[in-house]
Image (spheres, grey):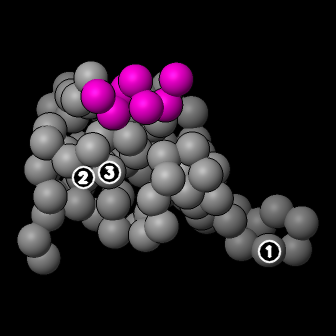
Amino acid sequence: MHAANPYRSARLGRVLALLRDGRAHSTREIVEAAHVVAVNSCIAECRQWGCEIETSRVREGGRTVYRYRLRSDVRCSVPRKAQQSLL
């Protein structure tokens, strides 16, 4: 898989900017806040660059919800432009 560089990609930067708060975010939360559609692909691309993102699967209201949490952002700096787009 070709993984975009999270240091240059505004799309991945927006996802990482959201995840930097250390909380677990659902797929829907990421879609709405970071304006991306393929969350699982964004997460996989960030992982290719060394980002430690954990995935959990939980049942909420009778449905399965996936949540993502950035464990370590030491190697995942977020471009300033992406940070500003979330404000």
Q: Which residue is mark 2?
A: 46
Question: Residue 59's spot in the image, x, y percent?
Answer: 77, 66
Residue 67 in sight here: no
Q: Amino acid at mark 2?
A: Cys
Whether 51 is drawn above or below 66: the answer is: above
Q: Amino acid at mark 1?
A: Arg
Cα distance in 3D space between marks 1 and 2:
26 Å
Tags 1 and 2 in contact by the CB under 8 Å rule?
A: no
Residue in view at x 32 percent, y 51 percent: 11
Give the left or right position of residue 66, taking residue 50 as reference.
right
Magenta span includes 57:
no
Q: Amino acid at mark 3?
A: Arg
- Which dot marks residue 63? 1
Q: Which residue is mark 3?
A: 11
- Secondary element type, mark 3: helix
Cα distance in 3D space between marks 1 and 3:
27 Å
Stretch of the chain drawn in magenta = 81-87
Residue 83 in sight here: yes
- Secondary element type, mark 1: strand
Question: Residue 43's spot in the image, x, y percent?
Answer: 35, 58
Within 10 Å of the Cα at label 1, are there few (<14), some (14-19), or many (20+) other Cα atoms? few
Q: Earlier in the sequence, mark 2 or mark 3?
A: 3
Q: Earlier in the sequence, mark 1 or mark 3?
A: 3
Residue in view at x 37 percent, y 26 percent: 83
Cα distance in 3D space between marks 2 and 3:
11 Å
Identify which residue, 69 or 40, lies in the foreground.
40
Residue in view at x 23 percent, y 54 percent: 47
